[in-house]
Amino acid sequence: MSWIFLALLVPLIYAIITLIDDNLLSYVYRSPRVAAAISGLFGVLPALIVVGIADVDKVPIKLILLSLATGALTVISYYLYFQGLSRTSPSVVAALMSLSPAIIPFIAYFAVGERLGLSAILGFSIVIVAAVCYSMVEMGEFRLSKALIPVFFAGLSLDFVAVINKYVYSHTNFLNAYFYYCIGLVIAGMVLMSFFNQIDKKTLATIFQRRYILLVLLLVFAEVLSLVAGFMFCKALSLGPVSLVAAIENIQPIFVLLITLSFFKLAPHFFLEAKSPGIKTKALLSLAMIFGVYVAVRG
């Protein structure tokens, strides 16, 4: 099943992006609003590519509006995600983002009539419970009132994006709808820019100065990775059950943990996650998530 391979790559890529974003937010973006707007504007790149190979004029107006809405909702989730990342560590963000998908099976049942088998339900439940426990291990590292709310609603926004996109892809060609999703990203990014204050405008003006060239290259790399992950996620949604695709994305904390442990000695300043408490517990919960994914997809 090709959707499983795509769904497994998505959390790996997002784990890399989360670690990069943590540093970009501190040294480049300096504001969740600037970060989310730039991420949205980068949606113009896949839109320009897709428009040449897709029949974008053959999509019903209802599906166009839904695709535009999911693009805009994705940018909103970016803003909330960066709000959380500005207040806590990447591993906490990755763990908290995995709390909201617990409601996806219920939304998917009513929205697209998706029914999971017993094995899929069991595996999904294992992943969700392990993800919740993983986030509990991190409870001492963030202030609940400041970190949980924006990150949870970022994840919740992406839940609705996933279910709505699944509905759209079930009724039209994937690339045709994906084009309008990208346009939704761009429009939302432009709208967000209209709310920039003077500090945001100054930040945007200084980002592309020559002295920041390495950070700008890192920014472009992260945004391109984000677009690739977003495309893979949407494609996986078009091929597989939305609940299971979302469940597999919950293993992102595993990749965050593996990456930080692997590169901590090379760059300890950028991979402080390796020094966070409860490493052994996180490793056991990571194994539980992997087992849950196996149980969910084997049926």
Image: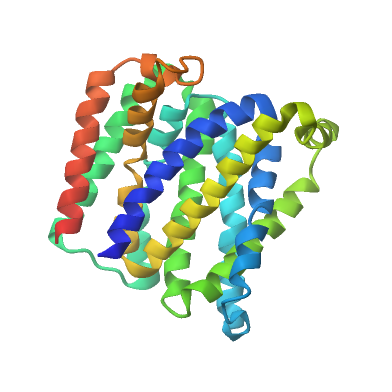
Residue at (20, 57) in percent of width and height: 297
Q: Give percent across and percent down for residue 188.
A: 69, 55
Quadrant of the image occupied by residue 126? top left
250, 48: nearer the viewer:
48
Q: Tell me, yes or no, if residue 22 can be seen here.
A: yes
Could you tell me which quadrant the N terminus lies in?
Answer: bottom left
Residue at (59, 70) in percent of width and height: 50
Q: Is residue 198 left or right of residue 143?
A: right
- Above or below — where is 247 with respect to 272? below
Quadrant of the image occupied by residue 243? bottom left
Could you tell me which quadrant the C terminus lies in?
Answer: bottom left
Q: Give percent across and percent down for residue 190.
A: 75, 53
- Above or below — where is 99 with respect to 270? below
Total label count?
0
- From this viewpoint, which residue is outermost toward the bottom? 58
37, 228: nearer the viewer:
228
- Above or below — where is 268 with respect to 286? above
Q: Tell me, yes or no, if residue 105 can be seen here.
A: no
